[in-house]
Image (cartoon, rainbow, N blue to C red):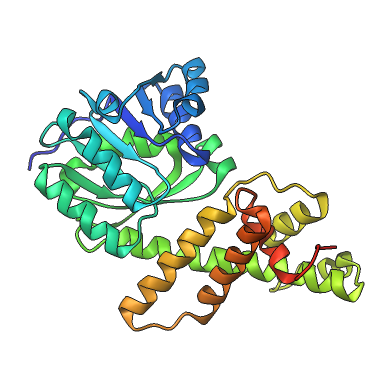
Amino acid sequence: MTEQLPATSVAVLGTGIMGSGMARNLARSGLDVRAWNRTRSKAEPLGQDGVRVTDTPAEAVDGADVVLTILYDGAAALETMRQAAPALRPGTVWAQATTAGLETMESLTAFAREKDLVLIDSPVLGTKQPAQSGQLLVLAAGPHPVRPVVWPVFDAIGSRTVWVGDSAEGAAATRLKLVLNSWVLNVTHATAEAVALAKGLGVDFQGFLDGVEGGPLDNGYMRVKSGQLFRGDLEPSFATRTAEKDARLIVEAGERAGVRLDLAAAGRERFRRAIEAGHGDEDMVASYFASFDGEAP
């Protein structure tokens, strides 16, 4: 495989919380960007930023140097790429950024082989604000010769790219993403439970913050998430429903590896209860509401 030239055009399939910010930053970087979303109305505002919104995945990928998938899960990514298949050229670079899980990554890899696509396993770490500001961390595994093709894409959406493998086979980047997400979700639950316990015991949470300030137990993420709860600001940077899906993928990955993940399993149950209580589309710190059988204080 010979080294290829940097991409000038990219198709973004999926313009939700993450994909919309990524598409805008790609357009602002000077790339020719086409975008598709299952609900077109959610993608329409991107037209103001120079993104061409299409009716079908096939229209979006037609002639694109890079196809970037950032959808709800791996099954959605595979379904969308199958819809795009008639317009996919052999050799097209596919940057797969959806958090897909290990089992589905095998199906995505098989599809790439079938269609002669160059798959880059490239999940991203970050939420709404980093996606909007182009400050995501890109975790990537893919062949060296095509890395120059995707550097304008990864440079536009992220602050840095960490290459963890030279092939998407084996899903090295997805494996790392699941480990990182396991930590993020557990810290989210720990924050939500600490706030809930403080509420239940009548403790001023500021005392907790003062107690850990400047020490090894202090945590900027915890302060941001607890602040959201106290402000009642549950606009999703990462939705509870999506977090529950990721928790499931983490538990499944652990089972495949013979690793029992008690915290991840319990966390998934907390997300499930929060969703059941009507908080599925709110920020995942809504795990807080799973601490109460009745109305939360």
Q: Residue reaching furthest left? A: 1
> Which residue is drawn at the image coordinates 77% and 55% (left, top)?
229
> Which residue is drawn at the image coordinates 37% and 39% (left, top)?
154
Q: Is residue 96 left or right of residue 229?
A: left
Q: As rendered, which of 75 and 177 lies closer to the eye?
A: 75
The quarter of the picture where the N terminus appears is top left
Residue 157 visible in the snapshot: yes
Q: Give the image location of residue 209, x and y in percent.
A: 82, 66
Q: Give the image location of residue 243, x and y in percent.
A: 53, 58
Q: Give the image location of residue 265, x and y in percent.
A: 51, 75
Q: As rendered, which of 129 and 284 lies closer to the eye?
A: 284
Toward which corner of the image does residue 178 lie, by quadrant? bottom left
Image height check: is 83 above or below 202? above
Q: Give the image location of residue 132, x and y in percent.
A: 55, 35
Q: Is residue 61 left or right of residue 160?
A: left
> Which residue is drawn at the image coordinates 38% and 64% (left, top)?
176
Q: Is residue 112 left or right of residue 42?
A: left
Q: Is residue 13 left or right of residue 227?
A: left
Q: As rendered, which of 223 and 51 lies closer to the eye?
A: 51
Image height check: is 15 above or below 127? above
Residue 221 visible in the snapshot: no
Image height check: is 202 above or below 137? below
The quarter of the picture where the C terminus appears is bottom right
Q: What is the number of callouts on the image? A: 0
Q: As rendered, which of 58 and 169 lies closer to the eye?
A: 58
